[in-house]
Amino acid sequence: MTNQQHSPALVQGTNFAFPAATVLGYPRIGPNRELKRAVESFWAGRVSASQLEQQAAELRARTRDHLVALGLTEPAAVPSSFSFYDQVLDVVATVGAVPPRFAHLRAADGSLDLAAYFALARGDDEVAPLEMTKWFDSNYHYLVPEIGPETELRLVSDRIVAEYVEAREAGVVTRPVVVGPVTFLLLSKPSDDAPAGFRPLDRLADLLPVYAELLGRLAAAGAPWVQLDEPALVTDTLDVPGERVRTAVTDAYRALASDLAVGAQRPAILLAAPYGDLGDNLPVVAASDVEAVAFDLVKGALPSPAALPAPSSESVTSSESVTSSATESAGTDGLTPGLTDSPAEQVRPADVVAGLARKTLVAGVVDGHNVWRADLGARLAQVEKLTTLGARVTVGTSTSLFHVPHTTAAEPQLDAGLRSWLAFADEKVLEVVTLARGLVEGRDAVETEIAAASAALAARATAAGVRVEAVRARTAGVAPSDLERGSAAERRDTQAARLGLPPLPTTTIGSFPQTTDIRVARAAHARGELDDAQYDAAMEAEIARVIALQEEIGLDVLVHGEPERNDMVQYFAELLDGFAVTRNGWVQSYGTRCTRPSILWGDVSRPAPMTVRWTRFAQSLTPKPVKGMLTGPVTIMAWSFVRDDLPLADTATQIGLALRDELADLEAAGVAIIQVDEPALRELLPLRRADQAAYLDWSVASFRLATSGVRADTQVHTHLCYSEFGEVIGAIDALDADVTSIEAARSRMEVLGELRDAGFGRGVGPGVYDIHSPRVPSVDELGELISLAAADVDPGLLWINPDCGLKTRGYAEVVPALTHLVEATRSARGAL
Ligand code: GLN
Ligand code: ZN
């Protein structure tokens, strides 16, 4: 190992001091998506399991050495946060919580080999995979464990320990990172056979011994620290009463932290609370015996015992000096919200202060979830403020860095100014190391770095395009009437008269298969081998093919098929002012699936129409209506890196106005139906219920701003990619779209009941064809779903369409599936 000479992160005997600088996790996919390629090659049968293991070990080694070289040199500073697919699935595989339908894949000792592990994630011909869902307020998706009263919980995998040993033997003492027991159970769903009222959290007492055993093995292997991620403690939206969560935290960390001696039986524990603040859960975390707590000081506030409810005792005074200094605001930090005033849970601020004072507090001041360079001076002040609370304070990131790309060095094409405002994972590691040095050696020691960061921030604040007066003037002029389209019922009548559609109109969600020909043309165009005219001709030929196909199949409302779009967000980001796109800025969305979020850096405006030429061309080929196809403001923001220097609501207004102009141009070009997709509406929903109403207000307003400028006889559609609306159901109605298409095939139209109960009286297109599977549904199956739908929705409002866009499917499936869909609809019409 070359880092042998300059790396103090070598085994130096047991050292329980938490490192001065660390990150909560690091991208696992590899700087060139090596892991994606290796895993997909394994799936394709091109590499063996042992070759895959070998490639993964090499990637881990490079990552460790790289992090040490960047300055994470102390023992336990480098997180061991690798995963072949997903960190929640890793716990499933570690504790053996395998649903019965996968039982045959387990080895005799209960463990899962790599093929079995991936089968849980992806399913196979016979078994459905674990469900996948969004990880907190990020665009990462985890696999949902299924836990029932009978689920076996037993330590069946040593992988976490083995990865620690592998690193130590290579000379680096890492800090294993594991999803904590409370979060693991809170994110699980009850297994199918669980009785009503059962909660996965009911199994906590059975799970804790498994974690204790794991910690024991890590200790035996010499691990000084382990990180248990408990992000579930920063949200109150998980449908388990807060009191229940707090009891679980107390029980869990009593079992894991109190009863065992550090060193002999367990590593010291870092409890990490990324994505927000602990709020009401702060007192139980403070009261626990974990040795360290990591706070998200970017999204969350500085922990403030002063915000706790006043106790009835006289103990307030003892904490006053501490809390008053801790709560002086330095800009980015606010106050934690007050606790619920349940008397049974009443806590004394002095106890919280005392609990925190026994711990190392890791100040998560470098944003792991966004790409902006940190204001080092302000962040150092924030860290210093925390020292008034903890026994020791060190510096970290707010979240794992797996939400951001590896390095800005891989983006030489970016404007130099913009690049100097950015920090991707590697740059963030350097920021953490710098701040730690500032904390340990004093601010003067890092004066140069602070000055450089301040200069970059100052340049950013005044750079051309960041603040565009014309855009600000226009957003300031938005009036409430700009969000109104008048009576939905009247619109329905004029639209019906204009469109003359049959009952149960059929349509698709927008994209048609992205064929190899399309990709080849796009790549050749990017390389300059196809000129603009040739590329446009290739796209027009594709559109003509797709229109002809839809006419042949007999669909009623056609689409142009979106061949010109690399991605439904990036396409618009490339055409709007205020955005930049990266070349290599991949981040993991789930498993081996990566996305390349655009960077929203300035005020947004539309220099020219973005979609009109394609839609107009498509419409010129057919007498049937062609739907215009746009991506909504919230989805554009959710799938981009957003500004940290302007409220999200203001950016949403800017995008809303740009789209409003696009709708107007489409309308003027004769387009009678325009769909504005908002599949990410639920994604940005705040993790605290108290913040949700304000979010839903501005997100709905931005959609209405985009769509309310068109005439009453222009039909506005929206599309959402999910079927459980929960807290957003009111918002979906408030979008005021004339027609909403949603996912519904897998849940067999269950969502329609939810919509009916909420009084939803607009056009609705529940997906009858599940495009997430390569299966071609039969006419009978589709007919059955259509009659289920017709039973719940006024047939005058019902549309028939697939669940989502067809871009990931092949024509071999799409053509018969859509043919069946049209056939099933025709017979359903006969039965009306
Ligand atoms: N119009 C888009 C498509 O069909 C919608 C995709 C989505 O909802 N994610 O591809
Ligand atoms: Zn969709």
Image: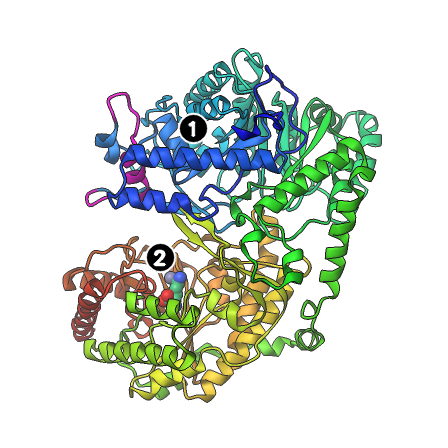
Q: Residue at x 41, y 33 (%)?
A: 57
Ligand 2 lies in quarter: bottom left
Going by the numbered disc 2, the residue's amino acid type is Val
**Can the viewer see residue 337 in this picture?**
no
Using the image, determine if residue 763 lies above or below residue 202: below
Residue stretch in magenta: 107-126
Compared across the picture, whether 505 is left or right of 319 comes to left
Residue 111 magenta-drawn?
A: yes
Q: Is mark 1 within 8 Å of ligand 2?
A: no
Q: Residue at x 54, y 30 (%)?
A: 2
Q: Position of residue 486 (x, y in %)?
A: 52, 80
Q: Position of residue 650 (x, y in %)?
A: 64, 66
Q: Which residue is mark 1?
A: 202
Residue 59 magenta-drawn?
A: no
Q: Position of residue 203 (x, y in %)?
A: 41, 26
Q: Secondary structure at mark 2?
A: helix
